[in-house]
Amino acid sequence: MSTTTQLTQSIKGGQWLVKESSPFDTFISEDYNEEQQMVKDMCGSFLDTEVLPVVNRIDAMEAGLMPLLMTKAGEQGLLGVSMPEDLGGLGKDFITSTLVNEGLGGGFSFSVAVSAHTGIGTLPILYFGTEEQKQKYVTKLATGEWKGAYGLTEPNSGSDALGAKTTARLSDDGKHYLLNGQKCWITNGGFADVYTVFAKIDGEKFTGFIVERGTEGFTQGPEEHKMGIKGSSTVQLYFQDCKVPVENLLGEAGKGHIIAFNILNIGRLKLCAAALGGSKRALTTSIDYAINREQFKKSISTFGAIQYKLAEMAIRCWVCESATYRTAKWIDDKEIELVQSGKPFNEALLGAAEEFAIECAMLKVYGSEVLDYVVDEGVQIHGGNGYSDEYIISKAYRDSRINRIYEGTNEINRLLTVDMVLKRAMKGRLDLMGPAMSVQKELMSIPDFGAGDEGAFAEELKAVASFKKAILIVAGGAVQKLMTKLESEQEILMNIADMAIDTFNAESALLRVMKLSERRGADNVSFELDIVRTYLTDAADRINKAGKDAINSFAEGDEQRMMLLGLKRFTKTQPFNVKEARRRIAGKLIADGKYPL
């Protein structure tokens, strides 16, 4: 086992907040091995040759087209990358499966269908099914012979999944569970062959069931007409004394919440990866348009306002990628560690994803909001043409909006981020008390306004360390002041979550450029360094604003003044000309004619 792996294994979820990280223990996109890059390239090629040429036919819901494309993807192994080989998959690592999500992420409705199938449509059975269930269903799902779907949401239970009303009762002969109820917003619901459905046994025990298409008492509604992802099948499911064989109970009776919530951790990171893939393609589309569109006898790519947009889109993509694969490697390493300790593969990956559930929630928020930003500015760069269906950016704009809603709304994920950090601190899984007390003492000391440590990246490292202190000031103060009332102060919790997201992203990006600098030499990372320094400068202001809003919500008098002074001190950065940095970033994008996929 390598030294890097041993060091990485010592990391726990949320620990980056109180522990210094090393760039040499950080996985970056430039670390992909040859096979991983080949898989990613294969995904891009599949989109370019099989999906994008028929994207309008997909949106028109041409009968049989989506299942056919998924079957083709399955034949190339793209649906079973992370599935065990003995169940028809390729048995690849978590990094590789994340790359598939990114590589297929620019496929509009097709990407949604594939993500639903390989994630929530397959993983519940793979991780919680009996050996018989896995042999019967996963072997067909991994190859694309069968398509999967997931029935959790109901008309009156969205974020409150456990408030579901669908019921299940054992039949008089003890051979079936009879399901009664309704599910809505079911992706792939119109053509799936097998569904994971949640119901409450006797109205109380929240439980998962495997339901096959054609089961007696199981019907579906018509396709929903949606704002975006129009080619994605979305229907309601109806159960009227639906006869599900007792052997199709999934996991343990009354333990359905374990299935539902654990699967979401993986899904959130994978959604971020897919959003990243879509963002990169939308940015390349916008770069190409800006270069070729002329106004006032000049390419609009020469205009400062357009260059600002292109550069900011690239900054957010690059930072998102840095945070995504840093976390994916942590999950991958933790999974290996758990397998080596004797855990079966299903418990290993679920345990690894749970360990980094905080980071998965943050990534879901950031990735979906990066995509929203990129496609919105993409439409703006296209001007009036961006509002026309003649241009694919309009489709990207409509399709992006759903990502901030499913896999838990971004508001829910922000609240979960802080809630999980605080609960882990209370249980002793994460030591926040010591670092928080150190920051309190530092606030009482005379501030050092010197130039800081010398050396490469010294200022950037100091900035990230200070951002972490800012979080500890605000979160610690909120806990001390509000105690149990904090959980109802959602605005404050979301302020703290935004501070954490910006800080994690800033550190991930900085570690990536430091590693690249060591590898290539300082003179060959100017593009990446401009990205990092611009992001750090802007993040400092955002962290200050979020922290100030939070402090002003719960503190008063001398306490308030001291905390605000500390916040100002810890969000202070060296002056940096972000205008010129963005022009340099945009200049490289324009010279290359694309954003690197």
Image (cartoon, rainbow, N blue to C red):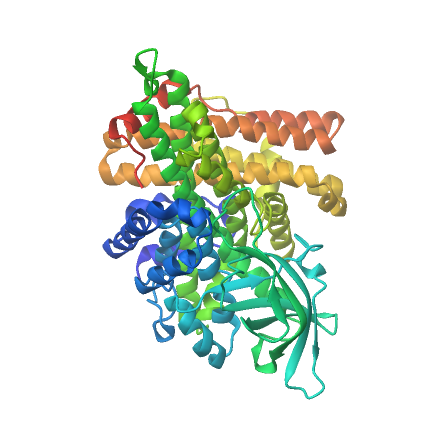
Residue 5 visible in the shown view: yes
Which residue reaches farthest bottom? 173
Q: Count up the numbered dots.
A: 0
Question: In the image, what residue occupies the spot 56% across and 31% down?
Answer: 543
Using the image, determine if residue 329 lies above or below residue 127.
Answer: above
Question: In the image, what residue occupies the spot 33% across and 67% down?
Answer: 90
Q: Position of residue 262 (x, y in %)?
A: 55, 61
Residue 18 visible in the shown view: no
Q: Position of residue 133 (x, y in %)?
A: 49, 78
Using the image, determine if residue 161 lies above or below residue 585.
Answer: below
Question: In the image, what residue occupies the spot 36% across and 75% down?
Answer: 86
Q: Position of residue 363 (x, y in %)?
A: 49, 46
Q: Position of residue 504 (x, y in %)?
A: 48, 41
Q: Quadrant of the C terminus?
A: top left
- Specify whether 211 is left or right of 506: right
Using the image, determine if residue 595 lies above or below residue 68.
Answer: above
Q: Which is nearer the eye, 543 or 19?
A: 543
Using the image, determine if residue 449 lies above or below residue 85.
Answer: above
**Which image quadrant for residue 80?**
bottom left
Q: Which is nearer the eye, 577 or 589?
A: 589
- Specify whether 409 is left or right of 34: right
Which residue reaches farthest top? 296
Question: In the image, what residue occupies the spot 35% across and 46% down?
Answer: 52
Q: Quadrant of the N terminus?
A: bottom left
